[in-house]
C-alpha cells in the first residue's frame, strides 16, 4: 500500500507564508512526478505544481509562479511546497498527488495514481 500524507497547512494573513510537506510511505513507492493540486469550495480541482523525481524539473500554474516553490528530498520520499506572499484566493484544500509512470498530461487530475487526504490552507485579509 502507498500512502501520501500532507502536513504543514493552517491559517495565515495575506502576505504570509506556509510550507506544505507530503511524505510518501510504502516500501513499493515509486513515481514519475509528485506535487500538488488544490480545490476551493464550489470549484474544480486545479493544478498547482509538480516536480519530476528524475532530474527535478518543476512545473507551476501561472497563478502561483514566482510565489510558490516546490522541492524534494529523494531520501525521504518527500516533496515540499513553500508558499510565500499568500493571497486570499489561495485559500483551498491542497492535495498531494503522484503519477507512477510517464505522462504528457501533468495538469490533469485524472492522470494521477496516488492522492493524499488533503490539507486546509486559509488566507485571511
Image: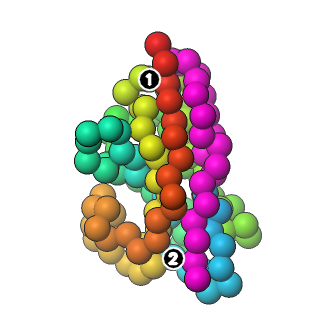
Q: Which of pointers 2 and 1 lies earlier in the amino acid sequence?
A: 2
User: With 107 as the anchor, is 125 left or right in this view?
Assistant: right
Q: Residue at x 49, y 25 (%)?
A: 123
For residue 87, which numbered disc appears in the image? 1
Residue that extends furthest to the top in the rendered view of this protein: 125
User: Foreground residue, 56 or 17?
Assistant: 17
Q: Residue at x 28, y 67 (%)?
A: 110
Residue 78: x %, y % from top left = 65, 62
In the rendered view, would you say 117 is above or below 42?
Answer: below
Asked whether residue 51 appears in the rendered view, the answer is: no
Residue 118: x %, y % from top left = 50, 52
- Residue 61 lies within the magenta run: no
- Residue 10 lies within the magenta run: yes
Residue at label 2?
31
**Decide: marks 2, 1 in contact (CB < 8 A)?**
no
Number of callouts in the render?
Answer: 2
Classify mark 1: helix, strand or loop: loop
In the rendered view, would you say 123 is above or below 93?
Answer: above
Residue that extends furthest to the bottom in the rendered view of this protein: 28
User: Foreground residue, 41 or 58?
Assistant: 41
In the rendered view, would you say 82 is above or below 98?
Answer: above
Q: Could you classify mark 2 by the number of other residues whose Cα lies within 10 Å: few (under 14), some (14-19), or many (20 or more)?
A: some
Residue 72: x %, y % from top left = 63, 58
Asked whether residue 76 appears in the rendered view, the answer is: yes
Dominant SS of magenta comes to strand
Q: Could you classify mark 1 by the number of other residues whose Cα lies within 10 Å: few (under 14), some (14-19), or many (20 or more)?
A: some
Q: Residue at x 58, y 24 (%)?
A: 12
Classify mark 2: helix, strand or loop: loop
Magenta-drawn segment: 1-21
Amino acid at each position: 500500500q502507498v500512502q501520501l500524507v500532507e502536513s504543514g497547512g493552517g491559517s495565515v494573513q495575506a502576505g504570509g507564508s506556509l510550507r506544505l510537506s507530503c511524505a510518501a510511505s510504502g516500501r513499493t513507492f515509486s513515481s514519475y512526478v509528485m506535487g500538488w493540486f488544490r480545490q476551493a469550495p464550489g470549484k474544480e480541482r486545479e493544478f498547482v505544481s509538480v516536480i519530476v523525481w528524475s532530474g527535478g524539473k518543476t512545473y507551476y500554474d501561472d497563478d502561483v509562479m514566482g510565489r510558490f516553490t516546490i522541492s524534494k528530498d529523494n531520501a525521504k520520499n518527500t516533496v515540499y511546497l513553500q508558499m510565500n506572499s499568500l493571497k486570499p484566493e489561495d485559500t483551498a484544500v491542497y492535495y498531494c498527488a503522484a503519477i507512477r509512470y510517464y505522462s504528457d498530461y501533468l495538469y490533469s487530475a485524472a492522470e494521477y495514481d496516488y492522492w493524499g487526504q488533503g490539507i486546509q490552507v486559509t488566507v485571511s485579509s
